[in-house]
Each structure stands twice: as structure tokens, then as C-alpha cells.
Image: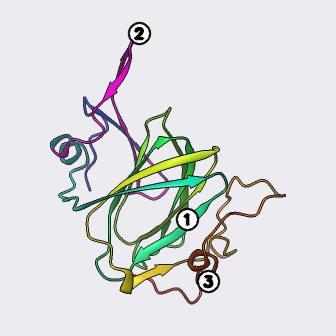
Amino acid sequence: MTVNFSHPKLQLTPTAIHDVLVVEPKVFGDERGWFTESFNAADFAAATDLDVEFVQDNHSFSRQWTLRGLHYQLEHTQGKLVRVVAGRVFDVAVDIRKTSPTYGQWVGVELSAANHKQLWIPAGLAHGFLVLSETAEFLYKTTDYYHPQSEVCLAWNDPAVGIQWPLPTDISPNMNAKDSAGLSWDVAPKF
């Protein structure tokens, strides 16, 4: 992937995982408020040199300390462009591609309605987030359709991965049964 870090409409910031990118669209504001193009296919392609087609948009609402993930699909793998339109989350991607130089590593980024940051997560990574604000609305575009038969959940707290979630020590995350039963790093299937 070739990245144009000086694109006129998008600021791109690399992360510790070379092809996970923080994407910041330009925000234009005045006394009335602000405007941003949250996604433009031509600009995204020109800035990232990625030939992706988004086929599904997802929108979730969650309460504080809800932890969703770490999800991925073994078939119909999904690249995701994620953002927050209300509240704040700590968003995490874990590299589960065996041939990647960052295999087994994770990155975490705070995404919020205020900072307008987005995160590009290519196919082959597990993804999840923790809600930091009272509530949050999370939107994401995917490059393939949801395929529940091939969905896998990696344990959010596996010590082999070692994600440092910004969770107070006296708080347990709010999780559904599927996410609570996430697989350990040792047994979770990889790419």
C-alpha cells in the first residue's frame, strides 16, 4: 500500500501496524457549526492507494464500558473504516495475519465525535472497541457482508495479546455472551 500523507482532503497517520491508518477528513467550521465529507471514494483511493469497495454500513449504539469484540470473519473477510458520531470509544485492531511483520500486535486509538478521526482496518485483523463516554454511536463501512457462520471472537483480555484497555480497575466491561466467550490467542484461528 502506498499512502499519500499529504493528500489535500485527508490527513493520514500511520500506526504501529503498517496498514492500519488513522484517517482524518478536513473539517470546515464557523460560527454556525462545522461540515466534513466523512467519506469520498475518490479521495480515499487517491490517499491510500487502496482499491476497496464498501458494501455495507453498520451503526451501533452502546452504553459506557460496553466492550464489543474482538471480531473477525474467516470467510468474507472485511476491511473496515470505522468512526464515532456521538461519544468516545477506544478502538482496537489486532493483527492476526501470520505472514505480517506485526503479527500478534495490537493498536488502539481514541475515536470520538469531537476529533472526527476514523480508523482504516484492513481484512485480516480482529477488531473491537470500548465505550468511554456515557453512550456512543459507532459507524463503520465494510468491504464484505456480515457472514455470521464464519465469525470468530478473540478474547478481549488474552494476556498473549496484552491489550491495555483504558478500563478502571473497579469496572468490569459490559459484554454479551458471545464476546465474553472469546477464544484465547493460542486456539483462535488465524489467517
Identity of the residue drawn at 63% across and 44% down: 133
How far apart are the alpha carbons under marks 3 and 1?
16 Å
Rendered location of residue 35, percent (x, y):
32, 25
First of labels 2, 3 by sequence position: 2
Q: Is residue 35 magenta?
A: yes
Mark 2 and mark 1 in contact? Answer it, CB < 8 Å. no
Residue 11 visible somewhere in the drawing: yes
Label 3: how many Cα within 10 Å (few below 14, some 14–19, many 20+): some
State the residue in front, 63 or 191.
Answer: 63
Rendered location of residue 29, percent (x, y):
37, 17
Label 1: how many Cα within 10 Å (few below 14, some 14–19, many 20+): many
Residue that numbered label 3 is attached to: 184
Residue stretch rendered in magenta on the structure? 14-41
First of labels 2, 1 by sequence position: 2
Instruction: Classify mark 1: helix, strand or loop.
Output: strand
Q: Is residue 62 magenta?
A: no
First of labels 3, 1 by sequence position: 1
* Residue situated furthest top in the rendering: 31
Which-is-in-front pick, marks 2 and 3?
2
> 32 left or right of 62?
left
- Amino acid beneath label 3: Ser
- Amino acid beneath label 1: Arg
Residue that numbered label 1 is attached to: 68
Residue that numbered label 2 is attached to: 31
Identity of the residue drawn at 46% across and 51% down: 138
Residue 27 visible somewhere in the drawing: no
Rendered location of residue 34, percent (x, y):
37, 22
